Amino acid sequence: MVTACALALALTACTGPGAQGTPGAAGVNDPYFPKAGNGGYDVTHYALTLAYSTDSTDTPHLTGTAEITARATGHLSAFDLDLKGMKVDALTVDGKNASWTRTGQELTVHPLSTVRQGKTFRTTVRYSGTPETITDPDGSEEGWLRTADGALALGEPTGSMAWFPGNDHPSDKATYDITITVPKGLQAVSNGELSTEKATGDGRTTTYTWRTTHPMATYLATVAIGHYDITRTTTKNGLPVYVAVDPQEAAASRKVLGRLPEIMEWEEYNFGPYPFSSTGAIVDRRGDAGYALETQTRPFFPGAPDTATLVHELAHQWYGDSVTPKTWRDMWLNEGFATYAEWLWSEDHDGDTAQQTFDALYKGDYYDDKADNDAIWAFPPAKPTSAAHISDSPVYERGAMVLHKIRQTVGDARFYDIIQGWAAAHRYGNANTADFTAYVEKMAPGKNFSGIWRDWLYGDGKPARP
């Protein structure tokens, strides 16, 4: 759709009679993904209504309506949403038809009149098509992925724009209602709690409605469509546990997933109260995805997980999902914490202590391959060299080593006060590395962390160990 107003936007603003304002920024200048996210508004809620089907050639088709509730942070003559691929069929702002233009992942919305600063407004986008699989700078796949019997949506770092329009940056979190209609016989699993499940379309389809009532970053939203064995249980304190496992992975997954309530109890003891209203897991046959992901409340695994990986992804619910990085440069606050959770679990369950793991990494005999050991020192955890390296070893293992150095400095009692307090202080919010270092220094007055920050967090190369 290209209206006269939209054409005129190539030269000047066209926002309706008497309108004033400026366009919101097309991107939030993330250091690694500058086009991700958008300026001028803050999303508070996504209501996504999706219908999934395949044609005679097994090509997937998605029809969607996204109702995006947001608050304007400036007077907006236009604003952007992130949407890659997919055909936009109609668009309204507060129920009034709006024009739009598209360039790459940027869907630029031109409302009939200026959206005033402080106003809460609703943008409704109707769209359809075959969603894309996006290849990350590091070569991994995200976005909309085919599975053996359905589909899977994964979003880290920029994949959500493949299946719904939004403000696709971790700094803008919102609540979600996700409704998915799928052909009879398939199931649809998402984040949060299942509100309704009912047969529709004369029994030819089934509609699932999922609700997430705590703020969630776009990259943590997921939809998994296929055949699943569903298990519903609760933890000792009554927290609902919803686990969906591809039947072919059920036997291999049963023992480890059976420990999920035990792991949750251990993590609450160590990290503080669980921040969400349910937990669980999704296990599907997507081996070529190559990674597990901490999708909020319901981590995804591309096959039967081992215990360490389950501990890691569940720890992310505190560190990454509840306390979310302000930019992708702060990834070590996700991965360093979740990796250190693995070390702590091993220490508490008759495995190597955290100190032994730290020593093995420092000495270079943790991995069998010398290149893997050397990779830990490729760059400092707080300064990945590019978007292609935000998920590399320094962010994970060396990030965990930073936490261990803090623990060595302050002792166990104060260390656990720090990591629990950090999760509580930034619960449901965003934080960066500077916020963390300031918090640590505040919690441990009189301790000198300058060497840790200089050598382990920000320093190039392998630190000289004291």
Image (tube, grey):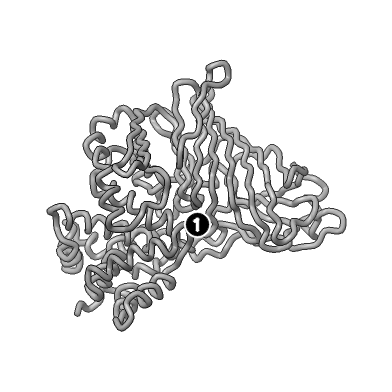
Q: Is residue 63 above or below residue 12?
A: above
Instruction: Bin the neighbour count of mark 1 within 10 Å (Cα to Cα): few under 14, some 14-19, many 20 and up.
Output: many
Q: Position of residue 230 (x, y in %)?
A: 36, 30
Where is mark 1, residue-wise? 170
Residue 369 sits in which quadrant? bottom left
Residue lying at 46% horizontally and 31% vertically, measured from the top left: 188
Please tell me which residue is depicted at 31% across the width and 41% down the height of the picture: 235
Name which residue lies at 31% across and 53% down: 268
Residue type at mark 1 is Pro
Q: Is 408 displayed left or right of 119 in the figure?
A: left
Horizontal arrangement in the rendering, residue 367 relative to residue 176 (left or right) = left
**Residue situated furthest top in the rendering:** 202
For residue 76, above or below residue 143: below
**Can see residue 355?**
yes
Camera-side residue of 391 and 356: 356
**Left or right, 218 with reference to 452:** right
**SS assignment at label 1:** loop
- Nearest the viewer among 168 and 259 is 259
Location of residue 103 in the rendering, given as x and y in whole percent from the top left corner: 65, 51
> Is 34 placed above or below 159 here?
below
Label count reads: 1
- Let me know if residue 153 appears in the view: no
**Split into 4 quadrants, where in the image is the C terminus?**
bottom left
Q: Quadrant of the N terminus?
A: top right
Q: Nearer the viewer, residue 199 or 111?
A: 199
